[in-house]
Image (tube, helix red, strand yellow):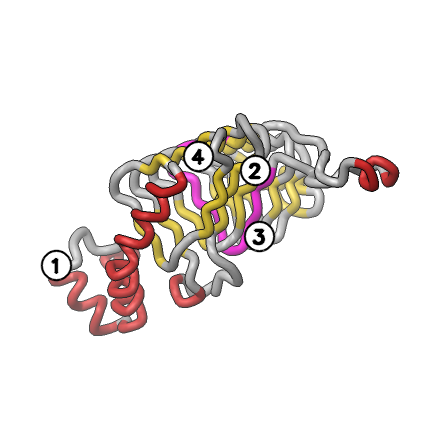
Amino acid sequence: MTDRDKTPPDSLLSWQAIRLAFETPWKARNEIERLLLIPFAWLGFRVIGVQIDKGWKCYGLPILQKHRDSQLTIGSNANLRSSARSNPLGPNRPCILTTRQRGAILTIGDNFGMTGGSIICEEHVTIGNRVFMGANSIITDTDFHPLDAQQRHTTPLDGQTAPVVIEDDVFIGMQSLILKGVTIGAGSVIGAGSVVTRDIPAGVIAAGNPATVIRDIL
C-alpha cells in the first residue's frame, strides 16, 4: 500500500478520487449516498438546535436527541459514520448523540471521527480535537439507574452522574465503554473492548476491563 492509498483524496474531482472510485467502488457508493443525505442531515441539525461547524460529513443519518434546554456543540470537520456500509467494521447502529437533561452540555472539538455507538450526556461531556471513537463504542456520564434497589423502584432514572473529559488526540478502540467521571489524557489510546472506569493519563496505551495502563506510547 502506498502513502497515497492511506490518505483520503482532497477533492472528489481529483485524479486520486477517480482512481479510488474505480479500484474501490463501495467507497464511491458511500460518497454518493453521503452527498444525497446532506440536506436531510443539515435539516436534522438545524431543527433540534445542534451547533455544528463547517466541513462535517455524515455517512448515514445520525440519531440526535437533544433536550431543548441543553447544549450540543460539534466542531469543524466532524465525520459521523452511521450506516453499516460506511466502515468495514460494520457499525451495528447509527451514531447516537444525546443530551438527556436540562442544563446538559455536550461539547465535541474539531476533526472528530465516530463510527456507530453512542455519546450520552446528562451533565457534562467534553471531547477535544482530533479524537477518534472506534466502531460501536459508548461514552456516558451517567449510570442511568440508581444502584440501590429501593431507589430504583421510586426514582428509576436517578442514576449518579459525573463529567467525562476526553482530551485532544485520543483514540478509542472499537466496542469500548467510557463510564462517568473519567478523564482520558491527551494522545492516549484505549484498546478495543475496554471498559474505562477511572482516569487514564496522557500518552499511554490502556486496555482491559477495567482498563489499566499497559505502557507509554513513546
How far is the residue under mark 4 from the one under mark 3?
27 Å
Q: Which quadrant of the rendered structure holds the N terminus?
A: bottom left
Helix, strand or loop at mark 1: loop
Question: What label does residue 14 carry, if any?
Answer: 1
Magenta residues, start to end: 126-140
Per the image, the residue denoted by label 4 is 72
Of marks 4 and 3, which one's residue comes earlier in the chain? Answer: 4
How far is the residue under mark 3 from the one under mark 2?
27 Å
Helix, strand or loop at mark 3: loop
Q: What is the x, y in percent for residue 160? A: 71, 31
Which residue occupies 60% across, 39% down? Answer: 140
Q: Amino acid at mark 4?
A: Leu
Q: Amino acid at mark 1?
A: Ser
Mark 2 crowdedness (10 Å alpha carbons): few <14, some 14-19, many ≥20: some
Select label 4 or label 3 by which is in front: 4
How far is the residue under mark 3 from the one under mark 1?
35 Å
Asked if residue 50 can be seen in this view, the reply is: yes
137 or 69: nearer the viewer: 69
Per the image, the residue denoted by label 3 is 192
Mark 3 crowdedness (10 Å alpha carbons): few <14, some 14-19, many ≥20: some
Q: Are marks 3 and 2 in contact (CB under 8 Å)?
A: no
- Residue 117, compared with residue 127, is above or below; it is below
Q: Amino acid at mark 2?
A: Arg
Of marks 2 and 1, which one's residue comes earlier in the chain? Answer: 1
Select label 2 or label 1 by which is in front: 2
Q: Amino acid at mark 3?
A: Ala
Which residue occupies 33% across, 41% down? Answer: 46
